[in-house]
Amino acid sequence: MFNIKDSKFTGYDYNDWFRYLKRNDRERLKIDFSSEHELTNREREIIFPSVRAFQRGEQSDGKCLVKAAVRFAKKYGEDKYPDVMKLFIREENFHSSYLAQYMNHFNEPLKKNNGLDHIFRKLRQSGGLFMEVSVLVTAEMIALSYYSALGNVARMIDSPALADICGQMLHDELPHIVLQSHTLGLLGTGPVKNAFRRFLMGAATIAVWIAYGDLLAQGGYWYKKFRSENFGYLAQSIEIADKTF
Ligand SMILES: [Fe+2]
Ligand SMILES: [Fe+2]
């Protein structure tokens, strides 16, 4: 489990985030497929259903999010926030492209839509920035557990390309969680919002486990561990938001 709340990112303002994301944008992962071997049918069955879903989930044009970010920037005088979120959306689209490259290498078809992703998107767009960012950060906290599990599976099946992708995702997602937690803090925290965030995490944890528990278990995440890590990340996110507020 990662320590998010004590990372160097927790003191960042939006100017720092802009500089960080710009710098990160110059260091994109070049995936090396030269050591990949053919995957067995069983290995494909284990990894691709969830990889396909996350490939889709990481991808977004971010139009609603940018609109909400512009409104927030005006209201709170945080001029840099929309630019930060544009760089953030760009980074998420790179994540999607890493997984797409991996799937293409193994001739696996990409998926246009999936049920869970659809629910996440509708939910995000159903409210203002609080809703957008709360749902987003819930998915990102679950992503930390998921890519940890997928990375373990990648090493088990000897797929260095997939292990590298997972490493890059973990490297990028942890700061994202700090960034969204900072914004949630500026929007104001409190017991009702925190209860809602716990409800979201509980529902998302169950839904992802039902859909992709097989992969998570192969990667060393039984339900109890998956749930406790997700809620551990949420506790850290709430702590960061409370400190910002
Ligand atoms: Fe991502
Ligand atoms: Fe992210």
Image (cartoon, rainbow, N blue to C red):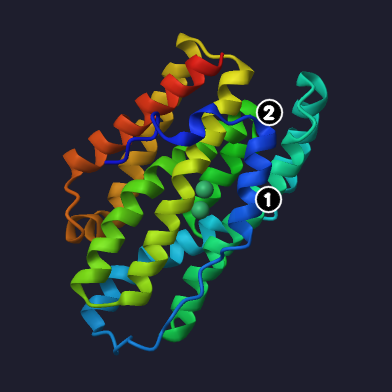
Q: Residue at left 46%, top 35%?
A: 8
Query: Where is 212 relative to 33, above or below?
Result: above
Mark 1 vs 2, N-terminal side? 1
Q: On the rendered structure, is 150 left or right of 194? A: left
Mark 2 residue element: loop
The residue that label 2 is drawn on is: 128
Residue 110 appears in the rendering: no
How many discs appear?
2
Q: Residue 153: horizontal and vertical position, in percent?
A: 23, 66
Say few, some or many: other residues with alpha carbon within 10 Å of mark 2 (under 14 / 14 to 19 / 20 or more): some
The residue that label 1 is drawn on is: 87
Q: Amino acid type of disc 2?
A: Gly
Q: Nearer the viewer, residue 170 or 65?
A: 170
Q: Residue 131: horizontal and vertical position, in percent?
A: 59, 30
Q: Residue at left 69%, top 42%?
A: 84
Residue 184 appears in the rendering: yes
Q: Residue 148: horizontal and vertical position, in percent?
A: 30, 54
Q: On the rendered structure, is 63 left or right of 41? A: right
Q: Residue at left 57%, top 24%?
A: 184
Mark 1 residue element: helix
Q: Residue 164: horizontal and vertical position, in percent?
A: 38, 68
Q: Residue at left 45%, top 59%?
A: 54
Q: Nearer the viewer, residue 159 or 127?
A: 159
